Image (spheres, rainbow, N blue to C red):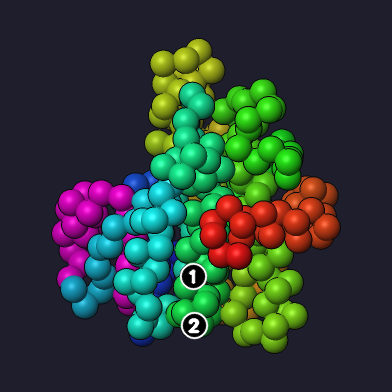
């Protein structure tokens, strides 16, 4: 198999793409490269002023993109954003936005912050847009190689009884994204839908995701390693799995894309495997139902 790179990303003229978390890191690169190939990109972000500044720096015009506010941690914000797109035809939704925090925090609705931001927000946004008939091609869910260290506890999703740690909570949230991606595809097939659900992970990329740990010993070590090319790749390379997942026309639903190098840390993108837990269909059905209940979709 030949390495896949940006030159292989097809022309996107006429396609409309929503990218959450599009003002930094992998989301920014993803939006930029899709716009460069003619896609109309909705930059979905918390800070509209920052989004407009970046859009200007990218040389984008109103014909190529627009900025809209959404805070994935706040389910009310997600609902408002979805309503604003009620009459749109969206080819691709890229659920890129996510967070990592070193201390236990909660969303406005009271959910553990990484679970609320990384799982419930993207889930609600996806389902609302699908109910509106807005998505026509595919949904891309951003997971992580860390999903292999996650463990879904259906009885305690918000870490009220379990001992919370940032690493376990983050890994579990990314396992949750992958579980939902696979379950979404199974439901598309059952419903006879032509929309596809795929997932991707960036490997280890030099982004600001783990900046909140900068003052901690492990955080300092991660910061140093993130600057070593042999260990971590650039945000540009880290975005390639997302672009592959979003842009390869014949990509089957249910595909998980990640880097091809050792440990899936770096390298050109390709379909990769995932943990046994991510393929547990019984857990997936119950996790889906729980997400429906927690987001008010039931």
Residue 110 drawn above or below residue 84: above
Please tell me whether residue 77 belongs to the stretch shown in magenta: no
In contact (CB < 8 Å): disc 2 and disc 1: no
> Judging from the image, what secondary structure is the residue with disc 2 in?
loop
- The x, y position of residue 230, in whole percent, is 55, 34
Q: Count residues near mark 1 (Cα–Cα under 10 Å), then give few for <14, some for 14-19, many for 20+.
A: many
- The x, y position of residue 242, in whole percent, is 52, 59
Residue stretch rendered in magenta on the structure: 38-61
Q: Quadrant of the C terminus?
A: bottom right
**Residue drawn where x is 67% and y is 47% of the image:** 175
> Judging from the image, what secondary structure is the residue with disc 1 in?
helix
Q: Is residue 76 visible?
A: yes
Between 117 and 210, the residue placed more toward the observer is 117
- The x, y position of residue 78, in whole percent, is 40, 59
Q: CA distance from mark 2 to mark 1?
A: 9 Å
| Circle number at residue 128 | 1
- The x, y position of residue 203, in whole percent, is 58, 44
Q: Is residue 37 visible?
A: no
Residue tagged 2? 133
Between 273 and 280, the residue placed more toward the observer is 280
| Circle number at residue 81 | none
Between 246 and 73, the residue placed more toward the observer is 73
Q: Quadrant of the N terminus?
A: bottom right
Please tell me whether residue 60 belongs to the stretch shown in magenta: yes
**Residue drawn where x is 81% and y is 60% of the image:** 281
Q: Earlier in the sequence, mark 2 or mark 1?
A: 1
Most distant residue in the top direction = 217
**Residue drawn where x is 47% and y is 15% of the image:** 216
Residue 158 drawn above or below residue 197: above
Residue 196 drawn above or below residue 275: below
Q: Count residues near mark 2 (Cα–Cα under 10 Å), then give few for <14, some for 14-19, many for 20+.
A: some
**Residue drawn where x is 21% and y is 77% of the image:** 63
């Amino acid at each position: 198999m030949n390495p896949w790179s940006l030159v292989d990303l097809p022309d996107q003229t006429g396609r409309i793409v929503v990218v959450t978390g599009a003002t930094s890191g992998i989301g920014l690169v993803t939006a930029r490269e899709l716009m460069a190939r003619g896609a109309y990109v909705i930059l979905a972000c918390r800070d509209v002023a920052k989004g407009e500044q970046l859009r200007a720096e990218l040389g984008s015009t109103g014909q190529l993109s627009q900025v809209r506010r959404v805070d994935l941690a706040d389910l009310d914000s997600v609902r408002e954003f979805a309503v604003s797109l009620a009459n749109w035809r969206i080819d691709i939704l890229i659920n890129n936005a996510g967070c990592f925090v070193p201390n236990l925090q909660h969303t406005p609705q009271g959910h553990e912050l990484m679970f609320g931001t990384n799982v419930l927000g993207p889930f609600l946004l996806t389902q609302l847009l699908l109910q509106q008939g807005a998505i026509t091609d595919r949904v891309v869910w951003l997971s992580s190689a860390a999903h292999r260290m996650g463990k879904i506890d259906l009885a305690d999703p918000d870490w009220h009884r379990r001992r919370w740690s940032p690493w376990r909570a983050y890994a579990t949230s990314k396992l949750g994204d992958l579980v939902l991606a696979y379950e979404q595809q199974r439901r598309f097939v059952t419903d006879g839908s032509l929309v596809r659900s795929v997932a991707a992970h960036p490997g280890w990329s030099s982004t600001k995701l783990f900046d909140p740990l900068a003052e901690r010993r492990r955080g300092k070590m991660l910061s140093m390693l993130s600057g070593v090319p042999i260990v971590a790749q650039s945000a540009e390379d880290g975005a390639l799995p997302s672009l592959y997942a979003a842009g390869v026309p014949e990509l089957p639903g249910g595909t998980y894309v990640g880097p091809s190098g050792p440990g899936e840390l770096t390298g050109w993108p390709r379909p990769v495997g995932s943990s046994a837990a991510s393929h547990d269909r019984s857990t997936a059905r119950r996790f889906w139902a729980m997400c429906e209940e927690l987001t008010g979709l039931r």
